[in-house]
Image: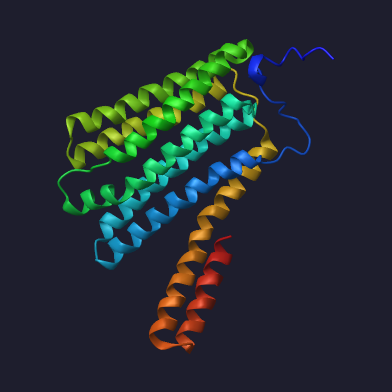
Amino acid sequence: MPPSSDTLHHHTRRMRGRDPNQLHRVATPLELLFDLTFVIAFGLAASQFAHAQAEGHYATALIGFGFASFAICWAWINFSWFSSAYDTDDWIFRVVTMVQMIGVLVLAIGLPRMFASLESGKHLDNSVMVLGYVIMRIAMVFQWLRAARQDPARRRACLTYAAAISIAQLGWVAQIIFDVSVSLFLILTCILLAIELAGPFIAERKDGGTPWHAHHIAERYSLFAIIALGEGVVGSVATISAVVEEQGWTMDAALVCIAGTGLTFGIW
C-alpha cells in the first residue's frame, strides 16, 4: 500500500489540525506523562506557601503562591490548547514535549528562590523560573511555527500565538537583565500578563482560531484540577502523620483526617 499523503519521512505527520468533532477524543498517554511534571511544581509551590505562612509572612505567602500558581497554570494551558488542536503524536511532537517537561521542572526548581526573594523584600528573583519558561517557550514557538507552515488555512492564528509568546518572553527576560524592584516588577508583570492573555484572544477571535476539541479540553481541565486537589490529599496525609507520630491515634488525628479529606472533597 502506498504511503499516505499525510506521512513524511521518518514517520512524521503534517500538522493540519485535529478534527474538532472527533468522537471519543481523550487525553493521550503523552499528555498524562506531561502532567506529572506539574505535580512536582504544585507540590513545591504548596510547601513554600505553607512555610511562609508558618513563619508569619502572609503577604509573601499570598503573592508568591499567586504568582507561582499563575506561572504553573499558564505553562500547562499553553501546551494543552496547542495539543488539543495539533497533536500529531509523531517523534518530533514527542521530543519537543519532552523539552517542555524539562522546562516545567526547571520552573519548579526556581520556586523556592522566588519565595525567598519576596521574604527579603529587596527584589523578586524569578530568574530560574524564567529560565524554565525560556526552555518551554522555545519549544512552544517551534511547535506554532511548524503548525503555521503545515496548516496554511490557519497560518495567521498560529503566527499570532508565536508572536505573542515571543514578545512576552522577551519582556520576562528583560526584567531579569535590568534587576527591577518588587514594585516595578509588579507593574511590568501586569503589562506582560496582558500580552500573555491577549495573544490567545486575538488568535482565536480575530485570526480564525485553531481546531481545538471542546470535549478534550474539558477533560484536560478536569485532570488538571485533580492534580491540584491531589496536594490537598498529600497535605492531609502529612499532617495526620505528624500528629500520629507525636501523639498516636487520637481524636485530633481523626478530626484532621476527616477535615482534610472533607475539605478536598468539598472543593472537588
Q: Position of residue 79 (x, y in %)?
A: 53, 34
Give residue 124's quadrant in the image: top left
Mark yes or no: residue 178 visible: yes
Query: How many badges with numbers are in the image?
Result: 0
Measured along the vertical axis of the image, is residue 154 above or below residue 79?
above
Give residue 148's quadrant in the image: top right
Pick whichever, 235 or 139, lies toward us.
Answer: 139
Residue in the image at 48% along x and 47% along y: 38
Q: Position of residue 221 (x, y in %)?
A: 59, 45
Q: Position of residue 63 (x, y in %)?
A: 31, 51
Pick whichever, 44 or 22, lies toward us.
Answer: 44
Measured along the vertical axis of the image, is residue 40 above or below residue 76?
below
Please state if 202 lies on the left or on the right of 32 as rendered: left
Please state if 257 lies on the left or on the right of 119 as rendered: right
Residue in the image at 85% along x and 15% along y: 1
Please state if 138 lies on the left or on the right of 207 as rendered: left
